[in-house]
Amino acid sequence: MQKTFKPGEKSNRSGQFEIVGPRGGRTGEERTVVIREPFPPTPKSGQKYVLTDASKNGAGKGRK
């Protein structure tokens, strides 16, 4: 199972994140999130985010 992220949690990568239901069901909705920025609120309670397409330009990799 893929790592999920809650709304308000800070992103560890930049990219496209899909909103999934409480049991992992896909919604087809995606949001673009930039590294170290919080995930936006989801349309319904209990939904989370999963990474679907990471940035490929190197800017989205985690830095220390």
Image: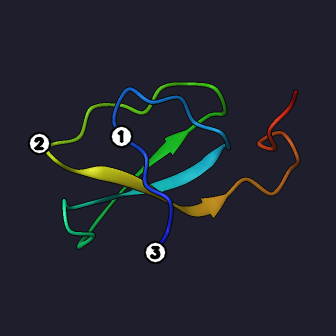
Identify the secondary structure beneath mark 3.
loop
Between marks 3 and 1, how big is the CA–CA gap? Answer: 15 Å
Of the image marks 3 and 2, the number of the one nearer the N terminus: 3
Is there a contact, CB below 8 Å, between mark 3 and mark 1? no
Amino acid bearing label 3: Met
Check disc 1: other Cα within 10 Å, few if <14, some if 14-19, many if 20+: some
Q: Residue at x 80, y 38 (%)?
A: 62
| 18 or 63: nearer the viewer | 63
Q: Which residue is mark 2?
A: 45
Residue 11 to residue 38: above or below: below
Q: Quadrant of the C terminus?
A: top right
Q: Quadrant of residue 8?
A: top left
Q: Position of residue 48 (x, y in %)?
A: 31, 50
Is there a contact, CB below 8 Å, between mark 3 and mark 2? no
Q: How many marks?
A: 3
Amino acid bearing label 2: Ser
Q: Which residue is mark 3?
A: 1
Q: Which residue is mark 1?
A: 6
Q: Residue at x 65, y 39 (%)?
A: 12
Q: Residue at x 19, y 59 (%)?
A: 22
Identify the secondary structure beneath mark 1.
loop
Of the image marks 3 and 1, the number of the one nearer the N terminus: 3
Q: Quadrant of residue 36?
A: top right
**Residue 50: mark in rendering:** none
| 54 or 3: nearer the viewer | 3
Identify the secondary structure beneath mark 2.
loop
Between marks 1 and 2, how big is the CA–CA gap? Answer: 10 Å
Of the image marks 1 and 2, the number of the one nearer the N terminus: 1
Q: Position of residue 13 (x, y in %)?
A: 68, 43
Check disc 3: other Cα within 10 Å, few if <14, some if 14-19, many if 20+: few
Amino acid bearing label 1: Lys
Residue 16 left/right relative to 46 = right
